[in-house]
Amino acid sequence: MNQFLKDWGEAAYTSLGFFWMALWAFSLGYLISSMIQVFVTERRMQKTMGDKGGKSVLLGSFFGFISSSCSFSALATSKSLFKKGASFVSSIAFLLASTNLVIELGIIISIFLGWQFVVGEYVGGVLLILSSWLLIRIINPKKLIQRARKRLDESSEDHADEKSLTKKITSHENWAKVGKQYGMEWKMVWKDVTVGFTIAGIVAAFVPDSFFQTLFINTGVGQQSFGFFTLLEHVIVGPVAAFLTFIGSMGNIPLAALLYGKGVSFAGVMAFIFSDLVVFPVLRINAKYYGWKISLFILFLLFTSLIAASLLLHYGFDLFSLIPQGTDKGITDKEHFAIDYTFFLNLAFVALSGLMVYFGFFKWKNVKHHKEMAPKSPLMENILKWIAMVCYVWLAIGIVLKFMG
C-alpha cells in the first residue's frame, strides 16, 4: 500500500511536471494560431484551392500549416473550404497539414522528443499529404466526391472583412477577436490535455516495461535491429494505442515520449503521433458531413498514408543515421520546476494569456467572434469532462501524497 501511494505521488508530480514543461509552448502556439485565424480570412484561402493540381495542394498545405492544431477545428474548416469550392484533395491536404505541420505541435515535440522527431513530424506530414494525393489520383473517387458535395448545404455568402492587413492589425476589434479565439483554442483542448498529461504520468509511474514489450513486439532491441514485420506491427498498433487514449495529438506527445523511452520503434512512435485523424470521433464527424461511404474512404486514405509515411521515415532516417540512439528514459527524471528558461517563459506567457483573455472577454467583450467547429458528441464530451475532473482530484491528492508522505 505504501508503495502504491508513493507511486501515486510520483505519477501526479510527473504529470504536472510534463505540463509545466509544455505550458509556454501551448500558449505561444495558440497565440500565433489565433492571430492567423483572425487576420487571414477563409475566403482568401478558399479562392486559391479550387483546382486539383499541385498548386492547390501546396496552398492547402500552407494554409493548414498556419492554422489551428485542433482536430475538430481542422475538420470544420476543411469541410467549409470544400463546400465553398476547394478541391477534395486540397481540403485533405489542409486537414493533414493543420494537424501535423502546425507550429505549436513542432514546439511541443521538440521539448519532449528532440529535434529528430520534429524533423520527422514535418517530413512525415508532407509524406502523408503526398501519399493521400497519390492515392486519390489512383483511385479517382469522382462519384463519392460528387455525393459529398451534394450532401453539404449550399454555401452561404462569406461576409469576411477584406480590409488591408495593416488596418486589421491596428483594429481593437480584431485584437478582441484574437483574445476570444485564444480562449476558444484552450476551451477546445483543455480536457484532452488534462487527460493526456495525467495518463502520461500514470503510465510513467505504474506501467511496467513488460506491458509495452507485449503490445509492441521486440520492444527495446535497438532501432537498427527492427525487422520489417516488427516495424509494420508497430505502425499498426501505434494508431490502436492512440485510439484507446482518445485524446488529440497535443495531449499525446508526452505519451509518445514515454513509448520511445520504453523502446518502441521510431516508426511506431511517429505512427502514434500521426493518428489523431484515424480515431472514431473523427470518423463519425466526417460521416455527418459527407456520409459514411466517403468517411470510410477518408479513413482508409489516412490510415494507409500513415503506415507508408511512418515506414518511409524510419528507413529514411536510418539511412542517414538520424534515428536517436538509445532510449530517452530521462524525461521522467528531469527537474521539471527548476528556475531556468522554461520558468521565465511560462511566467511571460501566463501574463500574455491574461492580456489576451482581458482583451477578448472583458475590455472589448461586446465584439462578436464565431468560428465553426465540428459537431462533437455531447455524450463523449460529458464523459471526457468528468474524466478530466477526476484527473484533477487524482492530481491534487497525488501532490499532497508526494510532499506529505
Image (tube, grey):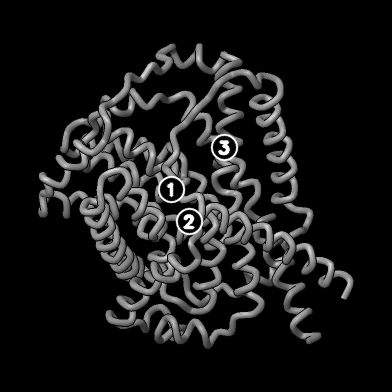
Residue 109 visible somewhere in the drawing: yes
The span from disc 2 to disc 3 (Cα, nearest Å) is 17 Å
User: Mark 1 or mark 3: which comes first in sequence?
Assistant: 1
Q: Are marks 1 and 2 in contact (CB under 8 Å)?
A: yes
Residue 345: x, y in percent? 69, 44
For badge 2, the amino acid type reads: Ser
In this rendering, the answer to whether 171 lies above or below 64 is above
Label 1 or label 2, whichever lies nearer to me, is: 1
Relative depth, front residue between 382 and 226? 382
User: Mark 2 or mark 3: which comes first in sequence?
Assistant: 3
Label 2 or label 3, whichever lies nearer to me, is: 3
Residue 266 visible somewhere in the drawing: no
Q: Which residue is mark 2?
A: 249
| Mark sitting on residue 71 | 1
Quadrant housing residue 102: top left
Q: Are marks 1 and 3 in contact (CB under 8 Å)?
A: no
Query: Label 2's element?
Result: helix
Residue 67: x, y in percent? 43, 38
Mark 3 residue crowding within 10 angstroms, few (<14) / some (14–19) / many (20+):
some
For badge 3, the amino acid type reads: Met
Query: Label 3's element?
Result: helix
Residue at horizontal 57 percent and vertical 53 percent from the top: 382
Query: Label 1's element?
Result: helix
For badge 1, the amino acid type reads: Ser
The span from disc 1 to disc 3 (Cα, nearest Å) is 13 Å
In this rendering, the answer to whether 185 lies above or below 388 is above
Residue at horizontal 24 percent and vertical 33 percent from the top: 86
Q: Which residue is mark 3?
A: 184
Mark 2 residue crowding within 10 angstroms, few (<14) / some (14–19) / many (20+):
many
